């Protein structure tokens, strides 16, 4: 460790490095999630669960033992998009649910390449979250914890896309760094779309929690969102019924974007990324008792209406055979979290 590392003395006193920097793999043995893999990363007081069977997305996350992610009642069972289970029956939330690689937004149908009359179905928010990752690295040392893996979305007569992901928790920084590379391994060009669905929940998300985006303009998706437009930035009191609200944020030009989710008590989550890579930004919120979620959603396209709209407006990312593009973001936390 360097002398500047604030945890250097702690590591020496602890004796066992695994007390503050660890990487543990497991398999759930019971219930709807039975048979699904988990990788738990610990770096200082940051504790994050990775979901290899959902593309190495992030599940439950805690800071100093306090949860910061929203998790739905479905949890994270293995998703099977060949069955008619419906998106809402398997969407577990978690700190990160990646949407793509060909669609985000509502489900879509388009003409396919498998012969006359063939159609390609793109489920809501794409197939990515149903694809198991191949984990190629999972380790922790005095610099922190890191996991790397590959997720391949492919079909006969269709696309062959691979996302290469690196998740890093540097020791002493209270941050999660995600770096993705999307590669077209097929013989034909591919039209790509990716959205990072970052889901924050109780107790970070409570009445008065503020969302700070620096947006020049905020647009409601529909009438339900229009009703909450004046107070889009402030999380409301919970009610028995609160229809979901989705807002689109237009950020000023620049080389970096930083989004803040600030609890009234001072504890704050920050999401930083390059808006040149992710020019779209959306906000999703529900304020019901037992269902309090605030999602921040950077995306490669500034539309939430799905693949057809993105194609019509020239907003998809075109990858030639062998082509690639990079994406990434950082989630960090400051202040003292509390369950109250």
Image (cartoon, grey):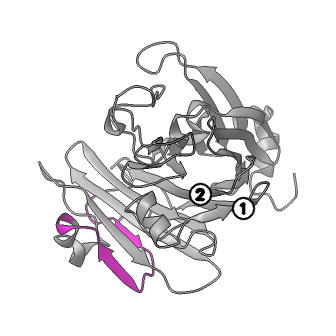
Image coordinates for residue 140, horizontal then vertical, percent: 78, 38
Rendered view: 86 above or below 286:
above
Image coordinates for residue 297, horizontal then vertical, percent: 46, 61
Numbered badge on residue 325: 1
Residue located at (34% from left, 59% from top): 284
* Spatial CA span between label 2 and label 1: 10 Å
In terms of secondary structure, where does tag 1 sit? strand
- Left or right: where does residue 22 sit relative to residue 108? right
Q: Earlier in the sequence, mark 2 or mark 1?
A: 2
In terms of secondary structure, where does tag 2 sit? strand
Q: Which residue was labeled with disc 2?
A: 192
**Which portion, as a residue range, is magenta?**
206-224
Q: Residue furthest left?
A: 240
Q: Residue furthest right?
A: 2
Residue 268 appears in the rendering: no
Residue located at (62% from left, 61% from top): 329
Q: Nearer the viewer, residue 114 or 281?
A: 114
Viewer-side label of 2, 1? 2
Mark 1 residue crowding within 10 angstroms, few (<14) / some (14–19) / many (20+): some
Q: Decide: marks 2, 1 in contact (CB < 8 A)?
A: yes
Was residue 221 drawn as part of the magenta stretch in this picture?
A: yes
Residue located at (22% from left, 67% from top): 222
Residue 80 appears in the rendering: yes
Residue located at (57% from left, 42% from top): 57
Rendered view: 92 above or below 259:
above
Was residue 88 drawn as part of the magenta stretch in this picture?
A: no
Location of residue 39 (image quadrant)? top right
Image coordinates for residue 126, horizontal then vertical, percent: 48, 46
- Left or right: where does residue 258 sit relative to residue 105? right
- Left or right: where does residue 323 sit relative to residue 126? right
């Amino acid at each position: 460790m360097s002398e500047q590392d604030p945890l250097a003395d702690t590591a020496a006193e602890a004796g066992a490095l695994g007390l503050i920097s660890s990487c543990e793999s497991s398999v759930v043995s019971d219930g709807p999630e039975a048979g699904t893999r988990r990788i738990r990363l610990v770096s200082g007081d940051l504790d994050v669960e990775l979901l290899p069977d959902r593309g190495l997305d992030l599940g439950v996350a805690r800071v100093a033992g306090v949860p910061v992610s929203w998790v739905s009642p479905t949890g994270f069972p293995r998703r099977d998009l060949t069955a008619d289970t419906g998106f809402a029956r398997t969407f577990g939330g978690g700190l990160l649910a990646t949407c793509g690689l060909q669609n985000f937004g509502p489900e879509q149908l388009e003409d396919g390449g498998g012969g006359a009359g063939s159609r390609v179905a793109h489920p809501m928010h794409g197939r990515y979250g149903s694809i198991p990752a191949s984990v190629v690295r999972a380790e922790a040392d005095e610099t922190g914890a890191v996991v790397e893996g590959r997720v391949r979305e492919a079909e006969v007569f269709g696309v062959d896309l691979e996302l290469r992901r690196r998740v890093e928790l540097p020791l002493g920084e209270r941050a999660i760094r995600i770096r993705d590379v999307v590669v077209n391994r097929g013989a034909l060009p591919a039209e790509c779309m990716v959205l990072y669905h970052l889901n924050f929940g109780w107790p970070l998300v409570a009445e008065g929690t503020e969302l700070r985006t620096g947006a020049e303009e905020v647009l409601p998706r529909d009438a339900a969102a229009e009703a909450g437009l004046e107070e889009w930035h402030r999380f409301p009191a919970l009610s028995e019924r609160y229809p979901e609200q989705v807002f689109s944020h237009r950020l000023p030009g620049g080389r970096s974007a930083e989004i803040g989710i600030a609890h009234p008590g001072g504890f704050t989550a920050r999401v930083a990324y390059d808006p040149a890579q992710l020019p779209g930004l959306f906000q999703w919120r529900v304020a019901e008792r037992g269902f309090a979620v605030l999602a921040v959603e950077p995306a490669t396209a500034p539309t939430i209406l799905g693949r057809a709209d993105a194609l019509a407006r020239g907003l998809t990312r075109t990858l030639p055979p062998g082509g690639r593009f990079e994406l990434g973001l950082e989630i960090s936390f400051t202040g003292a979290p509390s369950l109250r």
